[in-house]
Amino acid sequence: MRVSPVKVLFMAVIALLMARPAAAEDWPSRPVVLVLSFAGGGMMDFAARSIAQDLTAVFGHPVVVETKQGGGGLVGAGYVAKAAPDGYTLLVTAIGPMVFRPLMDKNVGFDADKDFTPLILVGDTPNVILASPQLGVGSIKELLAYAGRHNNQLSIAHPGPGTMGHLCGALFAAKTHINGNLVAYRGAAQIIADLRGGQVEIGTPAYGPGSDAVKVLAVTGEERLPSLPDVPTLKESGLDVECATWIAIYGPPGLPAAIVGKLNAAMDAYLRKADTREQFGKLGLRPLGGPPERLRNRVIADRKIWAPIIGGMKFDSAN
């Protein structure tokens, strides 16, 4: 029996429509990669690997972390922006690549709104003012006195162009009237290593594992960290500077709603666990979670806050 071309086309369309939900329901059927856009060893690395371990147990397929660092988080972000929207390549990133860099440079290589699918706002952590032990200072007051004895100059290490640490370092220098030599690094671990060795004088990364290997002079959040009860905030130290780095997870553009829902539900459940909140809290990371809209709204709010600040500052693209 001969089947008409119209009927064949109709049957093909029906089969395609039926296959799409099934594909989403079957996801994942192979390993999922979380692309870490900054160097390992810091808070983002810890959060990514903790989430990956939990998702592996939930989904029954490996969820692995793969580092693609460089460009202050732009390399990893650009990679995921071009990935297939199948849920097997996701991005772990921060406020810098998604908010700051597009405000500082229109040629970042992606559109932070159109080229990604928001999945979840993982959490936030304050930045810290770290000092090399070789300076012999124990407070912001002592640091400023040290700077005064050295032509009011300080080398300030930050985790890369356009990161919160970059802006925090620039704001700190501006508020203290220090001639800061901003030095870009690829992550907090390298900053701490060079602070210990005396290659740089202070650093302004997000607080994370290893930060207390050097001298923590102040935290830049609204309040002191439970894990550092004796370390004052910058406001307590007399400086009106407040900086916090958030961590988020995105997918490539066009990620199916069913996969977005599965990922968000699983990650949000993990972030709500008492053990997770306690573990993250000890390291200074405040778990947030919630629906994808919470991440989208946070980006919009941060742009409104930081756009005028960035507009009034001058940055060397190399630093």
Image (cartoon, rainbow, N blue to C red):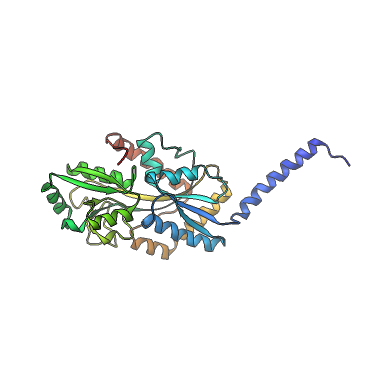
Viewer-proximal residue among 213 and 26? 213
- Residue 43: image quadrant is bottom left
Relative to 91, does residue 61 appear above or below in the rendering? Answer: below
Image position of 115 (left or right of 315): right
Q: 183 or 96, which lies in front?
A: 183
The mark tally for this picture is 0
In the rendered image, the residue lying farthest to the left is 149
In the picture, which quadrant includes the C terminus?
Answer: top left
Q: Residue at x 38, y 41 (%)?
A: 99
Residue 38 percent coordinates (x, y):
39, 50
Quarter in which the N terminus is drawn: top right
Task: Give the percent coordinates (x, y) of residue 31.
Answer: 55, 57
Residue sitting at the far bottom: 275
Question: Residue 178, position in %: x, y?
Answer: 18, 43
Q: Residue at the spot x=78%, y=40% of the render? A: 8
Give x and y (percent) for residue 93.
Answer: 42, 49
Q: Name the side, left or right, on which 60 lies relative to 189.
A: right
Identified at 87% across, 39% down, the residue is 2
